[in-house]
Structures are given as structure tokens and as C-alpha cells.
Amino acid sequence: MEEYTREPCPYRIGDDVGSAFAMGLVGGSIFHSFGGYRNAAKNQKIVSILREVRTRSTLTGVQFAAWGGIFSAIDCTLVAIRKKEDPLNSIMSGGLTGALLAIRSGPKIMAGSAILGSVILAMIEGVGLLTTRMMGAMADPTAPPPEALDDPRTLAASGPPKPTSAVPSSVPVGQSEPGIDSSKTPTASFGLPAGFFNTQ
């Protein structure tokens, strides 16, 4: 996939850490605000929401930032090893990141997290590829307008293509085309005009 408008590799780690932290902070704020509202005492809804958002949303943002940083560091390492950027790097990075984050839970949990991370990244990359191809087909400047293909008047007005002067004639050498009096046009051997050899 020739996309990859991301930052170059050493700098994309910080970019991904910041983006992941922002996503975790916003998503965690929304999620924990619902939890604070549901578990709050009577007449304490707003206070409980603010407390949950203040104490838990930053932790969610840090967890997202850690995942994004590890993922981006592994992705840059794979780019340096394989010397190319493609969806396979992201899929492998997702699996290794899931395994590293679950390293304290044992090999079985690590394997499950690695498979889950690879599957999630494969789905994301697949959706990205489909979207890129659909948008590329829609924005193709060389494609004819659809109304020109369906209108028979456009086809009739254009008519058959006319032969150009660059196309050689189908008349055999030594014979004249229809409508041309060959007796009035003096020719030498091989159909060359008379006096051709005198001018050389």
C-alpha cells in the first residue's frame, strides 16, 4: 500500500504517543462520566461525574499512550529491518504490542493478546485499503463522465474514428488508390516518383 502519509519513523513515535493519549483522554472521559453518573448518590451526579473524569480519564490516556508508543516503536523497528512499509508491519506490530503488554500474565495470555492485536490491526488495515481504493476510483480524473457513456447521442455525434496520415495506406505498392489516374503521375520502379534517383 503506497499510502503512508505519516511522519517519518523516528518522529512518528512521539506523534503516535500524543495521539493515543488524546484519544484515551477523550474516550475515557466519556466512558467514566457514564460510570460516575450511574454510581452517584442522589443529588451528587455532577460531583461524581467530575471526580471520575478527573481521577480515571488520565489513567486511560496514559494506557493508550503506552500502547501507542510501543506499537510505533515496534513498527519503526520492522521498517528498519524489512526496508519497506506495508500493512504487514502494522499487523505484526499489533501482535507484538499485545504480547508485550500482557507479559506478566503468562504465555497463554500473551498468545491470546498477540492474536487479538494482530486480528484487530488486520481489520483496520483491510478497511483502510478498501476505503483508499474506493476513494481512488471515485476521484479518478481519467474516467469518462457517466452521462457520456449512457447517452446514445454522444456516441452518434462522435462517429467512427477517422484514419490519420500516420497510418500507412492499405493499397499495395505499385497500384494507385481508387479515383486517382495513375497514368498522369509518372513513377519509377518500386512506386517511387519519377526523377527520385536524379535528385540523390
Image (tube, grey):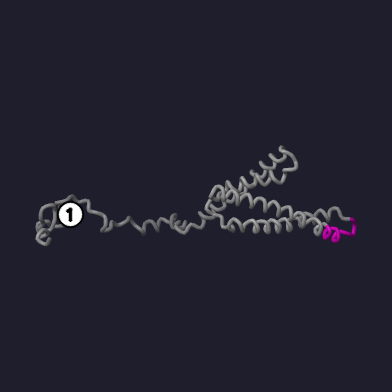
Q: Amino acid at mark 1?
A: Glu
Is 43 covered by the magenta stretch?
Answer: yes
Q: What number of labels is visible?
A: 1
Quadrant (top left, top right, bottom left, bottom right) of the C terminus: bottom left
Q: Name the residue carrying label 1.
A: 177
With 1 as the anchor, is 163 left or right in this view?
left
Is 44 covered by the magenta stretch?
Answer: yes
> How far across and how far down the image is residue 134, in percent?
54, 52
Quadrant in the rendering for residue 18: bottom right
At x 77%, y 55%, the residue is 59
Q: Which stretch is magenta?
A: 41-51
Which residue is at the front of the view, 73 or 152?
73
Q: Main secondary structure of the magenta part?
A: helix
- Report crowding for label 1: few under 14, some 14 to 19, many 20 or more residues within 10 A (C-alpha): few
Where disc 1 sits, the SS reads loop
With 39 as the anchor, is 23 left or right in this view?
left
With 121 as the anchor, is 101 left or right in this view?
right
> How far across and how far down the image is residue 2, in percent?
52, 53
Which residue is at the front of the view, 35 or 77?
77
> How far across and how far down the image is residue 132, in percent?
55, 53
At x 12%, y 56%, the residue is 182
With 139 as the anchor, is 37 left or right in this view?
right
At x 10%, y 53%, the residue is 189
> How far across and how far down the image is residue 25, in percent?
74, 58
At x 28%, y 56%, the residue is 163
